[in-house]
Structures are given as structure tokens and as C-alpha cells.
Image (tube, rainbow, N blue to C red):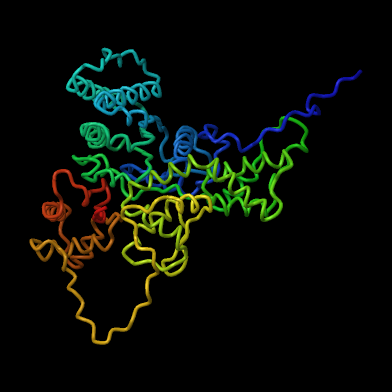
Amino acid sequence: MRRQPLWIVRQPAVNPFRNRKPILDPAEFYGREREVQQIAGQLAIQPPQCCAVVGLPRTGKTSLLYYLHHQALRPSPERMLELRAYDHILPVYVNVGPYQAMGPLHTHGARYFWQDLATALAQAMGTPTETLALPPMQHDHSDARALDHVHALRYHVAELIRTCSAELVLLLLDNAEAIATMPHAVGSLLRTLTQDPALGNRIAYVATSHVPLHLLSDPATLPVPSSFWSLFTEPVYLGQLEPAAANALLQRVSPATGHASLHPPHPFSPHDEQQLVRLASRHPDLLTLAGALLYDQQLAGTAPRHPADWATFEQQLFEVALPILQATWQAVQHVPHASALLYRLAHLPHTPLEPEVGSVLTLLARYGLIELGPQGRGHVSAAVLRRFIGEQPSPADALPLHTVPAPVAPAASPPPAAPASEGLPPAFTHLEAEVYAFLAQHAGEVCAREQIKHAIWPTDPPSDSALQKLIERIREKIEPDPKHPRRLIAVRGQGYILYPETPAA
């Protein structure tokens, strides 16, 4: 009897949405075109600018770093064209996250981090790693001994970069918020690599984190602020996928493992896709999880068809998505007033909000947690996340659950407007007040030196060094420690950025 060809034999169907691990194959990387171009643009500046990538848990930060690693080695014609300005880029990936949970042994964690960084760099260069061998570190060894090793490894890393033939050494630091739990010297030493005259133009960091890195300079979480954070300017946020990328995610299929009819080109109908986006928004991992659940139900013949079926599906998705929802809720606790505003939007969507919460509202939209409407209104983007937040206890700093009343015309003439300098430290001189007011007007944005000078002195601008002296005097009056600024930061090769004052929790 003639045997059938293998491709005709029906094999068990494979759910193409089951693999939710970081994407290692660049051919399978989808979406994030805008974010990739933003990162490439910052790296193309001379000197190359360090880039912070901010995203909540399971939004694809690690996948993005793997993609950057591949593109730095072999840029494709379609993406990251800016990197073609470099003939040779050496990408080095290090996951900092494992060193965050070492508790009292955080100094030893710093030593392991630097050893892994040096080892990864040496391996990328093809250099023998035997020279990195250090004596085993026992838990009873002193912190001073561990810090000695950290300094030795830092100078070894600098020497490796100095002898490297690459035009740009790109250090990809995953879960970089762990650096905030290490000794202050770790961040300072990372910064000194960019300040070395022989290395500064040949090194850049791309660091991922759950929250903007400058928030980690808050005294409640980092008693001594790390100068490392000031290397990063406006972060690149990984929020929701673009609609086209979300559609591509839902329409993907697994490699052919059987008869072609088992793997239709488009596994879901337009109505199915609409329902999945309603429940999970365009959050990459939530949407993948929803697709996996629906795909399994289609194979079993239990896929939802009626509104009541979709209500049951929502309950099932809510139960399997709890780990993602809990991790998301935990991550936003680090952003002042974010959980309180989400709690309010979950209970009263599409209601007007006070102007003072505008910055938090914008941040939540960048995270992809909410969608903004007209007149400062918004709603939680994913139905399962809205339900999860609604079931949480009211946050300690929760805003009152009421709508903002419409403004009432005053019976009398309003008082005269307060002078622009009101609220500034009384010791400010006239020029200091003008420069501070200009930076405050553009808070959170990088202001170029020429932009500042021409705004304050349109006809006779001062030199860069004179402006720097003025900035230093402002720091002395607004910073707790002017030598380690938290708010008024110099951005290498560009200008200055004034971060908004963190509100009290």
C-alpha cells in the first residue's frame, strides 16, 4: 500500500498564541516601529544619547532589546537606518533584574552585575574571559571587599572598550531599576564610562525599566541620588501596540504542522478581533493571552457566539490574566497618584478631571493603560483591567469619586493674576527666575542651550559657560544636594531638563 506524503498526515493543531516568552527571532518581531525609530534617532546623535525604554510588565521590553541587539549587528534596509552611520556596532545585553532581590547582599549583587557585564562584553569582542576570574565571594566577606572588586571590574570594562574596534559599544541593560537597589557607586561608575574622554563618544546605554528612571531618585527609594539616571532624557514608552500591529498579532499562524486547512490564514473573524481588543486592549501580552484562549475554544468547538458567551469568555480571560493584572497594578504603585487616578477612572469613566492630574493622566496614556478623550477625559483601555482595578480597595491617596463641577462665573471681578515669579524661592535673582520659569514651562523636555539663551537674551546671549554658572546657582537653591541633582539635569551634548517636582504621596 502506498504511503501518504508526510505533509498530508494530519497532526495535532498547535496554538500559535501559546508562546508568550520574549521574542528571540527578529523575523517574528512585530510592531514597535515608532519606538525603534526613536531609539535609533537618539543613538545616531553625536555623541550618542543614552535611551530609557519604559514599559509596564509584559509589554515586550526584553523582546525589543533582543531586536535592537540583532539590528545593531545587521541593520535591515527597512528599519533603524540611522544606525548605518556606524560601520561597526558592538551590542552587549545584560539582565540586571536578578540582582534586585539580594536584600542585605546588595553589595555582592553589584559585584556579580559588573562581572556579568565584563564577561558579556569580553564574549562579544571574542576576548578570552579567563582574565576576569576573581576569587569566590563568600557571603561573610565584607562589603568593602566586594566594592573593591566592583572598581576593579569597572576599569577592566573600560580597558576592553578602549581596545575594541567598534565605533559604538551599545550596552543593553534590561530591568535597570535594579541598579537603584545597589550601592551608589554602581550608577556613578556606569556614568564615568561616558565621561571618559577616550570612551564617551563610543558608548551608549539603552536601559529598560517599569517606571521612568528619574523617579528612582526619590529620597524614599534612593537615599543618595544616582547620577546615572541623569544620562537619560525623555524616555521611550512601550504602551499599546499600533492598530496595524495588533491586527498582525491576531492574524498570525504557527508553522505548518499538518494539513493547511488546520491553520487558516486568519484564525479570527473581524467581530472576534473586535471583542478581543475590547477585553484586552492592544496590550501585547494580554492580547496574546486572549488569542490563545479563543483559539483553544475554537478547536474545541466552544468558542463564543452570543453576547452571553462573550460574558463567560471575559470571566475566563480575567482568571487566566490575573498574574499580568496584578503585576501591572503593582508597578503603577511607584508612580505618585497613578493608582488613585486609575481607581477613579475605573469607577467613573469619561468624566472631566481636574487640571492638576493632567501629567499623571498623560503618563498613564503613554503606558497604554488608558485612552484619552476630548476635554481631558479618559477611560481604562482593557475591560479586564478595568474590572480588576474596580475590585481593588481604595488607594490611600485616592481622589474623591465625583465629577468636576462646571465653572461658575464669579460674582465679582477676579483678583489680579499672580506674578510669574510667585512660588519661586525668594533668593532667586531676576535672571535666575527667568531661566527657571522658562525651564518650568518646558518641564520634562530637553531645552537646548541655544534655545534657553535666545529666549532669555534675544540680542546678546551669554556663553555656554556663563549659562552653566547660572544653572549651578539655580541648583543650589532648588536641589537638596546640588552636587547630585535630582531635578535640574544637564543632558550630554544637548542642554538641560527640569523634571517636575514629585508631589507628596
* Residue in front for this viewpoint, 422 or 231: 422
Residue depicted at 18% across the width and 47% down the height: 485
Position of residue 129 measured from the top left corner of the image (x, y, whole percent):
35, 16
Position of residue 464 measured from the top left corner of the image (x, y, whole percent):
17, 53
Position of residue 254 measured from the top left corner of the image (x, y, whole percent):
66, 35
* Residue in front for this viewpoint, 331 or 399: 399
The quadrant of the picture occupied by the N terminus is top right
* Residue in front for this viewpoint, 209 or 69: 209
Q: Residue furthest left?
A: 427
> Is 273 above or below relative to 209?
below
Q: Is residue 84 visible?
A: no
Q: Is residue 144 visible?
A: yes
> Is 156 above or below relative to 426?
above
> Is 7 above or below relative to 452?
above
Q: Residue furthest bottom?
A: 412
Position of residue 438 measured from the top left corner of the image (x, y, whole percent):
23, 63
Please tell me in which quadrant of the rendered image residue 397 appears. bottom left
